[in-house]
Amino acid sequence: MQALVDGEMFAVVPVPWCPHLDSLFAIPPSVKFEQGVKCTECNEKNENWVCLHCYVTACGRSINGHMQAHHQATQHALVLSLLDLSVWCNICDAYVDNPLLYDAKNNAHRCKFGEDMPWCYRTDIQME
């Protein structure tokens, strides 16, 4: 912690809430956030994101920016990284971590590692 305070290292701290979480729905059982899915616009497989509103898979800004183009076209705010399972809000311009995201993150975790992600939140919240 002292290294952070002294500016010797940097840490990204996700916000615990963003208003766009209210627009999410429960993920249908048939939707799987599989690894190795190609971007809908190009053949990229390595740094893809999944839209948590419509489940489109597209590449990140450091590749060809197709997920940002998807956001511009649809205004879908929240996306999940298939690489590190983080969630980004394109409108709030911030990483978000909230219990409402557990189902999405666990879906990707199960596809990537073959097991459930440990529950790491204080409350038991489920979307309907």
Image: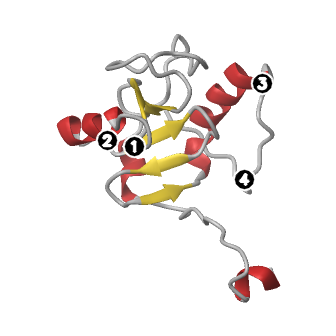
Residue 39, placed above or below residue 5: above
Q: Position of residue 75 (x, y in %)?
A: 23, 43
Direction left: furthest residue: 73
**Label 1 vs label 3, nearer the camera:** 1
Which residue type does callout 3 highlight?
Phe
| Label disc, if present, on residue 127 of the rendered structure | none
Lower sequence index among marks 2 and 3: 2
Q: Are circles 2 and 4 on residues that touch, CB within 8 Å?
A: no
Residue 125, placed above or below residue 92: above
**Label 1 vs label 4, nearer the camera:** 1
Picture mark count: 4
Q: Are circles 1 and 4 on residues that touch, CB within 8 Å?
A: no
Q: Are circles 1 and 2 on residues that touch, CB within 8 Å?
A: yes
> 56 or 67: nearer the eye?
67
Location of mark 4 (residue): 121
Tell me the distance, in whole angstroms, between the alpha carbons under discs 2 and 4: 29 Å
Q: Position of residue 53 (x, y in %)?
A: 37, 33
Asked which secondary structure carries label 2, the reply is helix
Tell me the distance, in whole angstroms, between the alpha carbons under discs 3 and 4: 20 Å
| Label disc, if present, on residue 61 of the rendered structure | 1
Asked which secondary structure carries label 3, the reply is helix
Location of mark 3 (residue): 113
Direction top: furthest residue: 30
Q: Position of residue 45 (x, y in %)?
A: 52, 21
Residue 109, placed above or below residue 81: above
Lower sequence index among marks 1 and 4: 1
**Label 2 vs label 3, nearer the camera:** 2
Question: Residue 41 occupies which quadrant of the picture?
Answer: top left
Location of mark 2 (residue): 68
Residue in view at x 77 percent, y 43 percent: 119
Q: Decide: few, some or many residues near mark 3? Use Cα within 10 Å; few <14, some 14-19, many ≥20.
A: few
Q: Quadrant of the N terminus?
A: bottom right
